[in-house]
Each structure stands twice: as C-alpha cells, then as structure tokens.
Image (tube, rainbow, N blue to C red):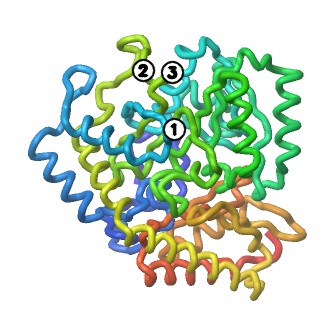
C-alpha cells in the first residue's frame, strides 16, 4: 500500500504500529513485538506509562496550547523550575523549551554567537546533532545527512572522538585537536565545542573521561562554551539521570530532548544564567515550544525519575544485559558477535566478523529476522554495524529475557559468509 508521504524517509521496519504498552507494541495486523527501539530513545520509561498518560489527560482538560512568548503559562514555568533544580550543575541555571533536539541545537548555536561574538564550532567524528540546516553540519558523518545539500554553515570543524569503543585514544584525540588549531582554525574564532557524552547514531560510543576533562580545561582556558548534547543519552538512558555526571564535568549549555516528555515532542536548552540571560529580546522562542500538554508529561517524567524503583530497574536491566551478552561471547554463538559498546544501560552490540569485518547485509538480516520473530531493533554506527539497544530502562524481566532470546537465536543463525 502506498501513502501520500515523502519517500525521503529511510524506514527501518516496514510495519504499521497501532498501539503500545510498556515494552510491547502491536501492528495493524495484531502481531506483537518486543520493542528494543523505543521510538529511537524517546520511551525510556515505556509506552503509555500510566502516570504520563494521566498527566496528559488532566492537562488536556485545562489548557491544550499557548505560545509562551505571547502569554506565560504555568506548566512551562513549573517544569523549567523543576528541571533546572534537577540537573546536577552547581551554577544558577536558566533554560528554554523547544520542540526537538535539532531545534535545541540550533538555539544553542545562536546563544553562543550572541554571547561570544564567535561563529566557529568544534564537533566530533561520529557525532549526530540533528537534520536541520545548521545542526546537520555538526554531524560527524556525510551520508545521508549532508549529501546533496551543497554549501553548509561555515566555521564547523571536526576532530577525532576519544573512546574505548572506537579505538581512538586520549593522546590521538588531543593530537587531532592540536592539529586542527594549528592548520585549520584560529582558537580565538571558536565559540563552542559540542559533543555527546555517549554518541547515539555513532554506535553508543562512550567518551573517554580524561578527554572530556581535557576539553573542559581547554574551553575554560580559551573562553569557549562547552555544549553537551544529551538528547539521546539523557533522562536515564545510561542508568543515571545524565551521562555527563560520569565524566566528572559540568557543561555550560546542556541539550535535552527525546525521553524528557515520555513520547510528546519536547526538548530544551539549559545553561548557566550568565549565558542564557541578557540575550536579544525576541531572538529565542517558538509557537509550539513548551506546549502545556508536553510540559505536563515532562513533569510526570521527572517524578518517575525521582522514584528509587526506576533506578533499581535500570540497574537490573544493565546487569541482565551485560551478563547475557558475556555468556554469548563465552559460548561463541556467532562469528559476527563482536564487542559491546557504550556505558551503563546505554549499550550497543557490534557485528563484525574476524575475517570479513563489517558487512551491510548482515545488519539487514538481523533486523529482518528479529522482526519476523517479534523483536524490533535499531542499527547505528559508521558502517551501520552496531545494534543500539533502546528498550525501556524499566523493561520487565520477562520481556527483556524473551527479547534477548530472540536476538541470540538470530545471531546464532547468521551465515559465516555474507
């Protein structure tokens, strides 16, 4: 069946969903799937969480919309106060709400330009920050995001991302940054450094802690704004509220989105008051940004994140996942089963053969076979060779065990030759 929708989308799973609850979704034929995609990291607490649904319904009876830059509304104010109090940064925080992670990224770039008078931005190989025209040039990958777009926003420089998961050491990453500043960019023209503490699209690559702390010192020395993109890694994805805490740093601007409103479109830029205040009046805002219903959902998410049971479940998920994959590796269930990437509860599984390396057909086979057996998976990585696991961090053990059993079965049946 054809639909009047652009064919520019790259669809991972050609099924049509009708409903979902917890960690299970059902398609239009009634078939059920265990969901390890979670709307690409948007459903860290599962589908239709009762507390989130209740908050949405209650708010829908009071006020469905108002543009905050026209008239203030209480859900926006209540949420920003609670969010800024929740984020573990010592300085006074101020923020704004947006509709998407890409929009947050765009606004962060505007803030940096206004405050520093500098247009240069350092980003990293493998990073992903959005598909809008300014954000897209920050992505550390050309295909398919930059293909056919012509000249993009100038002053963006890419350098190696230090991580145990990609084999780039601290020393190599430092040398890459030093080379960039000696060959391509004057450090006095750089307004911001932007990075994901755990790369999402890049394959769940966790930044080296020493390199993150080096970047913090580098930014302080040169008056550069550190932007940490937690659009995918935030709101519990790693098993902690925010991934930057693991690195022993605090960002100047923090980008948030995806799971912050339990499935409703909401994102944010939060940062030090010295950066977020004193900007040109009217330069920030948006008609739908901070919609009251989305804010109500987001408030309930913060309540869920303050429950001890949430983090107990996330820890149990991490333990089961790591123990299971370690057992697979010991049993050598497949020649294609490689290393596990990421940190905490944010993990990826590398598909790489000792003889053939990576191969695109293998990921396609895994996605198809898993779907046929009732499991939805999401690819990632430079060569589309890493399965990024995005089930709810509160997934019940039965669903998790069943989903992993399906994945084991699929991996065990992969052909040795692609």
* SS type, badge 3: helix
Labelled disc at residue 277: 2
Residue 414: quarter of image = bottom right
Quadrant of the image containing the C terminus: bottom right
Contact, mark 1 vs mark 3 (Cβ under 8 Å): no
Whether residue 161 sits left or right of residue 321 in the image: it is: right
User: How many numbered marks appear?
Assistant: 3
Labelled disc at residue 111: 3
Mark 1, Cα crowd under 10 Å, few <14 / some 14-19 / many 20+, is many
Q: Position of residue 324 (x, y in %)?
A: 63, 82
The residue indicated by pointer 1 is: 254
Q: Position of residue 57 (x, y in %)?
A: 16, 53
* Earlier residue among tags 1 and 2: 1
Q: Nearer the viewer, mark 1 or mark 2?
A: 2
Indicate whether 306 appears above or below 276.
Answer: below
Whether residue 388 sits left or right of residue 265 in the image: it is: right
Q: Position of residue 260 (x, y in %)?
A: 39, 49
Q: CA distance from mark 2 to mark 3?
A: 9 Å
* Earlier residue among tags 1 and 3: 3
Q: CA distance from mark 1 to mark 3?
A: 12 Å
* SS type, badge 1: strand
Q: Residue at x 17, y 39 (%)?
A: 64
Residue 223: quarter of image = top right
């Amino acid at each position: 069946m054809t639909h009047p929708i652009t064919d520019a989308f790259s669809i991972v799973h050609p099924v049509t969903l009708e409903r979902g609850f917890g960690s299970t979704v059902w398609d239009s034929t009634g078939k059920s799937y265990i969901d390890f995609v979670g709307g690409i990291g948007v459903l860290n607490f599962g589908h239709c969480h009762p507390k989130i649904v209740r908050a949405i319904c209650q708010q829908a009876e009071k006020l469905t919309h108002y543009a905050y830059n026209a008239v203030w509304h209480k859900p926006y104010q209540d949420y920003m106060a609670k969010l800024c109090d929740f984020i573990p940064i010592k300085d006074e925080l101020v923020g704004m709400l947006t509709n998407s992670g890409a929009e947050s990224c765009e606004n962060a770039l505007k803030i940096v330009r206004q405050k520093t008078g500098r247009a240069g931005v350092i980003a990293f190989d493998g990073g992903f920050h959005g598909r809008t025209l300014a954000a897209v040039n920050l992505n550390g990958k050309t295909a398919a995001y930059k293909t056919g777009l012509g000249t993009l926003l100038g002053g963006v420089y890419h350098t190696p991302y230090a991580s145990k998961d990609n084999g780039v050491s601290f020393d190599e990453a430092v040398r890459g940054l030093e080379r960039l500043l000696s060959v391509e960019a004057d450090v006095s023209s750089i307004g911001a450094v932007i990075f994901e503490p755990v790369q999402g699209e890049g394959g769940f690559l966790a930044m080296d802690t020493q390199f993150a702390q080096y970047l913090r010192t580098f930014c302080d020395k040169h008056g550069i704004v550190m932007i940490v993109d937690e659009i995918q890694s935030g709101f519990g994805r790693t098993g902690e509220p925010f991934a930057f805490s693991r690195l022993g740093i605090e960002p100047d601007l923090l980008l948030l989105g995806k799971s912050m409103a339990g499935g409703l479109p909401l994102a944010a830029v939060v940062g030090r008051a010295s950066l977020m205040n004193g900007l040109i009046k009217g330069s920030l805002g948006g008609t739908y940004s901070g919609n009251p219903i989305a804010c109500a959902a987001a408030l309930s998410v913060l309540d869920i994140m303050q429950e001890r049971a949430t983090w107990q479940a996330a820890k149990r998920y991490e333990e089961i996942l790591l123990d299971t994959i370690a057992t697979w590796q010991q049993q050598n269930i497949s020649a294609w089963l490689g290393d596990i990437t990421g940190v905490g509860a944010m993990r990826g599984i590398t598909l790489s053969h000792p003889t053939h390396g990576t191969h695109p057909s293998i990921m396609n086979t895994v996605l198809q076979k898993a779907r046929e057996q009732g499991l939805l998976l999401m690819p990632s990585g430079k060569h589309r060779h890493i399965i990024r696991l995005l089930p709810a961090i509160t997934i019940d053990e039965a669903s998790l065990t069943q989903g992993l059993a399906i994945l084991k079965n699929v991996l065990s049946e992969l052909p040795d030759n692609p």
